[in-house]
Image (cartoon, rainbow, N blue to C red):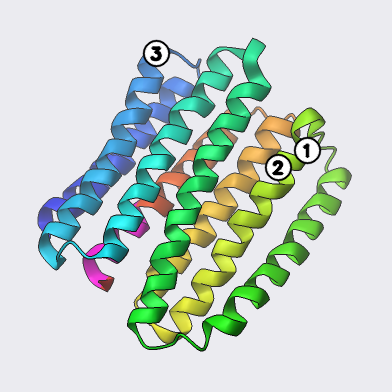
Amino acid sequence: MIGSIIFVVLSMVICVAFCVLRASKATFYSLTLKILASLCFIFAGILALTVVGWGTVGIMIIVGMVFGLIGDIVLDLKIMYPEKNDTYFLIGTGSFAVGHVFYFIAGLLTMLDSGNAIALSWAIPVALVLAGVLTLGIMLSSKKMGMDFGKVKWAVVSYSVVLSFMFFFSCFVAIFNTMFWIFAAGMLVFLLSDLVLSMQYFGGKDQKIFIYINHILYYLAQCMFALFMLFGL
């Protein structure tokens, strides 16, 4: 248990160190720190499973974290090599979307394991509708904020639906499994992180403070997923 918590703390500490370098310039050294911070929350999750047992739910979350690591790397390459901006964005966002699929499976299995299969018949469609409404609200407000998604508009819309769906679905799962609120809270923080990231990428918000807010929120979210495995499985 202590080992998992130590890696959670390390992930956040290295995240801050990464932000210091990244706020100056995206380099190989800043990318290395970013990878280390991501490896730390993955190790935190792995150590959590060595304590609570290697169940399918935990494994799905670990796989989702790994896709988050991949997305992390690719999105930083987007900054380092702006001539391939859209390509790296699509690959990175796609990787995060795949990660959310595994998080969804983890939530689905949690519902089934707790004997609430019937609740899925309304939880999934309601979460999907709410995700559509939230995405519509985000897209409408983005215009007022002067955000221009360019050629990747539909990729942004699609990912927004996926991420919003996961947030609402996680909340529904948490209604039937109280400890899942740790995961749901992490998904909310994840959502906030990506909203900040959108302002950076598409709204011209390139102030250093946004780099700190975006990454600290993101790593906090992944660390909360690891803590859920430690205390909720």
In the rendered image, the quadrant that contains the N terminus is bottom left
Q: Residue 82, located in which quarter of the rendered image?
A: top right
Going from the N terminus, do you reach mark 2 or mark 3 first?
A: 3
Question: Real-space Cα distance between discs 1 and 3?
Answer: 29 Å
Query: For the point 43% across and 41% down, which residue is it?
Result: 68
Front residue of 117 and 37:
117
Question: Real-space Cα distance between discs 2 and 3?
Answer: 27 Å
Q: What element carries label 2?
A: helix
User: Given the image, on which type of amino acid does mark 3 rest?
Assistant: Phe
Tag 2–tag 1 contact (CB < 8 Å): yes
Q: Residues within 10 Å of mark 1 (few under 14, many from 20)?
A: few
Q: Is mark 3 on a helix, strand or loop?
A: helix
- Point out the stretch of residues depicted in magenta: 223-231
Residue 206 spot, x, y in % from top left: 66, 27
Magenta-drawn stretch contains 178: no
In the rendered view, would you say 202 is above or below 112?
Answer: above
Residue 23 shows in this picture:
no
Residue 91, disc: none
In the rendered view, would you say 4 is above or below 211?
Answer: below
Residue 230 shows in this picture:
yes
Residue highlighted by disc 3: 28
Residue 153 spot, x, y in % from top left: 78, 38
Residue 213 spot, x, y in % from top left: 53, 42
- Tell me if 155 is positioned left or right of 93 in this view: right
Residue highlighted by disc 1: 153
Q: Residues within 10 Å of mark 2 (few under 14, many from 20)?
A: some
